[in-house]
Image: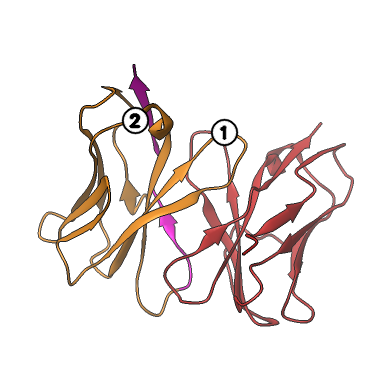
Amino acid sequence: DTGVSQNPRHKITKRGQNVTFRCDPISEHNRLYWYRQTLGQGPEFLTYFQNEAQLEKSRLLSDRFSAERPKGSFSTLEIQRTEQGDSAMYLCASSREIYEQYFGPGTRLTVT
Amino acid sequence: DQQVKQNSPSLSVQEGRISILNCDYTNSMFDYFLWYKKYPAEGPTFLISISSIKDKNEDGRFTVFLNKSAKHLSLHIVPSQPGDSAVYFCAAIYQGAQKLVFGQGTRLTINP
């Protein structure tokens, strides 16, 4: 039983560049979530997919952020024109039931 | 607007003793609560949960207590082991919502 995987694990980029992260959920999970975590804080919700439909987006998800889950399996999170404030750990989670979400190892983004 | 609060940023406990981590919430709509454990450079790992219809849930060395009237929950770890040293996050969710709302976390250190 493989868990949630995320790639890359670390990404360093220059301000203004675009970055894309990938998440592969647990295979039988139809729900997929993206969260962001900054230092000293708990994860904050960004967006939620049920199968391929993006059903909820946080106000934290500005126009520069876009997420997709094209075939209801893996998902991508793209950040355009990165800013230093985007530096954070980006976490993906999946679940079969609503309540218990299982997290991947995260992608740490550093914007210089 | 911090709906879930963990007021102790850190806790130090001697190996073999009981660790008690606390969490308070403000939103009375929350009906399910979870504890996650996080090691450095890893994603949060689900530990234990409790529904609002219960006041206690036990799993091995871990017990979660819920006091709905006080809007307070706690995680007890007995006996504490060195491998329990991690950051612990309390999270809450309510039926109909998709996102977990996390506290800021408590760093638990178990001393030999």
In the displayed structure image, the side of residue B95 where residue B29 appears, left or right: left
Q: Position of residue B55 (x, y in %)?
A: 14, 62
Identify residue for label 1: B40
Name the residue: 47% across, 45% down: A42
Which shade is chain B?
A: orange
Residue B86 magenta-highlighted: no
The residue that disc 2 covers is B81
Q: Amino acid at mark 1?
A: Pro
Q: What chain does mark 2 sit on?
A: B
Amino acid on which the number 2 mark rests in the picture: Gln
Chain in red (letter): A
Which circle's residue, 2 or 1, is located before the other in the chain?
Answer: 1
Q: Are marks 2 and 1 in contact (CB under 8 Å)?
A: no
Look at 31% across and 41% down and name the residue there.
Answer: B6
Determine if marks 2 and 1 fall on one subunit. yes
> SS for tag 2?
loop
Image-quadrant location for residue B112: top left
* Residue B3 - label: none
Query: Which residue is pictured at 21% across the width and 27% down the height?
Result: B17
The span shown in magenta is B98-112
Chain to which the residue tagged by mark 1 belongs: B
